[in-house]
Amino acid sequence: MPANVNRAVPDPPRKMLAANSETLRKPLAEAIGSAIERAIVLARMTKQDVAFQMGYRDQSALARWISGVETPQFAKLWQIEELRGPLVIALAELAECVIETVVKVKRSA
C-alpha cells in the first residue's frame, strides 16, 4: 500500500461509545434543563402554565426535561410565544464564552 494512503481507523466498540456519550450527555442535558428552567423564570411563567400551553395535563414531562432525564422537545417550547425570547437568552447564557453575548429582544406592539 502506498505511504500516502490513509488507513481507516476502526470504530470503537459501541458499548464504549455509549458509555462515553452518557457521561458527556448527562451534564449537557442538565445544563439545557437549567436553561429551560431559567427561561420559564425570565418569562415570569409557572411550570404548570408552560406544561398546559404545550398540551400536557401536568408538568411531569417538563420536569423530566429540566432534570435532564429526557431530551426536551424544543418545538413544543417554541410554540409558547412568551417563552421564545427568554429561551434564546437562557441558552445563550450557556455558552460562557470570552466574548460577551448581548441579546436584544424587540417585541412588536
Image (tube, rainbow, N blue to C red):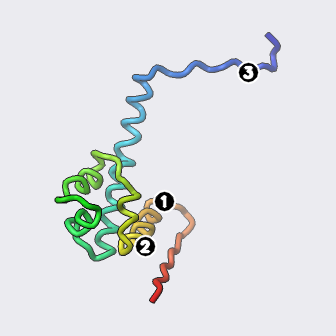
Q: Which label number is shown at residue 95? A: 1
Number of marks in the rendered image:
3
Tell me the quarter of the picture where residue 44 sits. bottom left
- Residue appearing at x 24%, y 53% in the figure: 61
Label located before the other in sequence (2 or 3):
3
* Separation of marks 2 and 1 at Cα, in angstroms: 16 Å
Task: Give the Cα distance between marks 2 and 3.
Answer: 47 Å
**Image mark for residue 85:** 2
User: What amino acid is at disc 3?
Assistant: Asn
Q: Is mark 1 on a helix, strand or loop?
A: loop
Is the residue marked by circle 2 packed among few (<14), some (14-19), or many (20+) residues within 10 Å?
some
Locate residue 26 relative to residue 107 in the image: left or right.
left
Q: Which residue is drawn at 46% across and 83% down?
A: 107
How far from the left and from the top, in percent, is residue 33? 32, 55
For the point 34% across and 68% down, the residue is 39
- For the residues labelled 1 and 3, the Cα–Cα distance comes to 35 Å
Mark 2 vs 1, N-terminal side: 2
Q: Which of 28 and 70 is in front in this view?
A: 70
Q: Which residue lies furthest to the left in this view?
A: 58
Instruction: Compare residues 75 and 3 and report the one nearer the observer.
Output: 75
Q: Specify whether 55 is left or right of 21.
A: left
Q: In this view, does 85 lie above or below 68?
A: below
Where is residue 18 shown, x and y percent of the image? 40, 29
What is the quadrant of the C terminus in the image?
bottom left
In the rendered structure, which disc, 1 or 3, sits on the residue that comes first in sequence? 3
| Labels 2 & 3 near each other (Cβ < 8 A) | no
Q: Quadrant of the N terminus?
A: top right
Mark 2 vs mark 3: in front: 2
- Which residue is labeled 3 in the image? 6
